[in-house]
Amino acid sequence: MIRPLHRLAATAAAISLVALVAATPVKIPPRLDAVLPAQSSLERSMQTVDDFDVEAGPLPQQLGRVLNKQQVDYIYSFEELEGIRGSAVHGRLSLADALGAILEGTGCSHELFAGTISILCSGRAHVRESRGPLHRD
């Protein structure tokens, strides 16, 4: 059977396209849960229970004692925290609970981002006296 030339060109173009697609390597994305660890080491550190014995005092010094003991990376603006006092924390607590207790009432909070704990203050945090120690056994 003789086909008109324009139909033959269209058929040849379609065959070329199919061959091109078949020859192009296709990357299949891996499953996300297979690539990402179930829990980062920082998240595990935040839940690990440890003994804390931190007196009430200037927030930058308290944060340094607590976070250096746990050997985690952290960042904060000293100017934002200057003059703010955190509460005392004593007893066996997770790092998340200890940070929460120290920062309670200061106008500051902590967030986990890219393997680092960021201490953030909403505007200028309130300068305050300690409300008393947190004791937990």
Image (cartoon, helix red, strand yellow):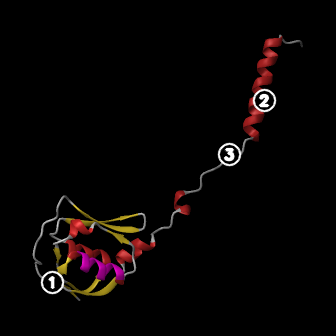
Q: Secondary structure at mark 1?
A: loop
Q: Quadrant of residue 137?
A: bottom left
Q: Tag 3 or tag 1, which sits nearer the N-term?
A: 3
Magenta span: predominant SS is helix
Of circles 2 and 1, the one toward us is 1
Q: Residue at x 33, y 78 (%)?
A: 67
- Tell me if residue 34 comes above or below residue 47 in the rendering: above
Q: Residue at x 14, y 69 (%)?
A: 105
Q: Secondary structure at mark 3?
A: loop
- Residue wearing tag 3: 26
In this rendering, position of residue 98 left or right of residue 15: left
**Callout 1 amino acid:** Pro
**Callout 2 amino acid:** Ser
User: Viewer-proximal residue, 111 or 33?
Assistant: 111
Q: Residue at x 51, y 63 (%)?
A: 36
* Residue 126 appears in view: yes
Bounds of the magenta segment: 60-68
Q: Residue furthest right?
A: 1
- Tell me if residue 5 comes above or below residue 20 in the rendering: above
Q: CA distance from mark 2 to mark 3?
A: 18 Å
Of circles 1 and 3, the one toward us is 1
- Tell me if residue 9 comes above or below residue 64 in the rendering: above
Where residue 87 appears, as percent x and y from the top left, is: 17, 79
Q: Quadrant of residue 83?
A: bottom left
